[in-house]
Amino acid sequence: HTTGRMTPRWPLVAAAVVLGACTDSAVSFTVPALIVSRDGVRGLGRLGPESGRSRLTPRCAREEEEEDLEAVRVSLRQEAENPFRAFRRALWPVLGAGALLGLAVSLEEVASGKQSLDEAGLNVAVDVLATAAFAGLYQWDSNVAARREARARRGAELASLRVRIVEQGKTIQASLSSLRRDRGQSRRAVIIAGTAAAVLPSVQASLDCADALLDTDLLVVPYILDGGEGEAAAIIEEGHPHLAWPSRNAAWRDLVADEISAAQEQGVSVDGGGAPGAPQAIVIVIKKNGRVGKRGFTPPGESLAWSSLIADVRNRRNMGMDVTNI
């Protein structure tokens, strides 16, 4: 600002910037890391300048280890995709603090009589607008980061879910993350969740096109709400390789409960409370790259259109398009 007689503000602003940068460097510049010790023990830690060494937290339980490893992968991917997030989250408060300091100096000069309110009016208006703008940018950046982190957490929770897969005549336990490309399985998981009346038609229809589902790497994962899985006992015992049955644990129940709530917000009932004779099941298609490719519902009282999913993969493959990520 150059209007009127004013005390230079840049030293104050520079001090705020330096203070904010020092504070941010002490807090934010740590990164999650997967640590492998010399004896092969894997664990999680964070690497940062405040300590010359990492902190290792070994995990013993296999399921907990896979969940934590997936969380580390998600966190590392987020930081790689958005490397300046920590810098921006420190920049907006620092710039806002500089504008507040400028506003305080302007008001102090008006109060001490060094300037009239008319002379300082422009400076006061600029400082107020700058403070509001930086506060708004900080709030917007925080909201975007919160939505992105929520999606990442949801993806990590989805990847950690465990299923029972038939492989070479044997039933094995695997997480959905192990179905991704370059991790041994490379399958597209199609989760169908709902009541037995809504899910079983799709399961029965999948038996008629089992070879085509295997050819296109589509893995059917039926989740039947509590009390209805007994109706599928015979199919489970047959051990079809294109079917994977969920491990009925809290993680699966929480996921399905969240999906049911989201469906109810759209006016769709999948837990037996909807219109009789027209049940619908939740459908979630997970691509080979681990991302959710589709969310939807089965037609009321009907099976999922497996032929459409099979044709989509085959058409892309015949046209030479990428089928390793979808």
Image (cartoon, grey):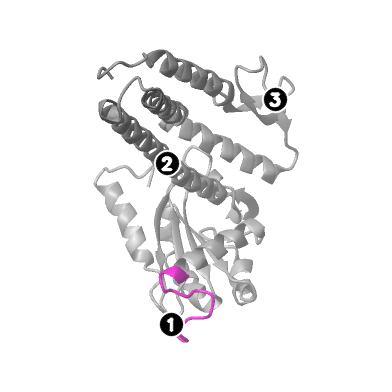
Question: Picture quarter containing residue 178?
Answer: top right
Q: Mark 3 falls on what kind of element?
A: loop
Q: Which amino acid type is marked by label 3?
A: Arg
Q: Where is residue 32 in the image (x, y as percent from the top left)?
A: 58, 29
Q: Name the residue under label 3.
A: 55
3 or 2: mark nearer the eye? 2
- Label 2 and label 1: CA atoms lie apart by 44 Å
- Label 3 and label 1: CA atoms lie apart by 54 Å
Q: Which amino acid type is marked by label 1?
A: Ala
Count every numbered label the image shows and give the total.
3
82 vs 219, nearest the viewer: 82
202 vs 96, nearest the viewer: 96
Q: Could you classify mark 3 by the number of other residues whose Cα lies within 10 Å: few (under 14), some (14-19), or many (20 or more)?
A: some
| Residue range (magenta) | 264-278
Is 161 situated above or below 137?
A: below
Q: Residue at x 38, y 17 (%)?
A: 9
Look at the image and tell me in which quarter the N terminus lies: top left
Question: Reading the chain from its start, which is encountered first: label 2 or label 1?
Answer: 2
Q: Which residue is drawn at 54% across and 58% down?
A: 241
Is 129 situated above or below 279?
A: above
Q: Was residue 141 drawn as part of the magenta stretch in this picture? A: no
Q: Mark 2 points at which residue?
A: 139
Q: Could you classify mark 2 by the number of other residues whose Cα lies within 10 Å: few (under 14), some (14-19), or many (20 or more)?
A: some
Query: On the rendered structure, is 281 left or right of 23?
Result: left
Is 11 situated above or below 215?
A: above
Q: Mark 1 points at which residue?
A: 278
Q: Mark 2 falls on what kind of element?
A: helix
Question: Picture quarter containing residue 294?
Answer: bottom left
2 or 1: mark nearer the eye? 2
Q: Position of residue 252 (x, y in %)?
A: 60, 59
3 or 1: mark nearer the eye? 3
25 vs 235, nearest the viewer: 25
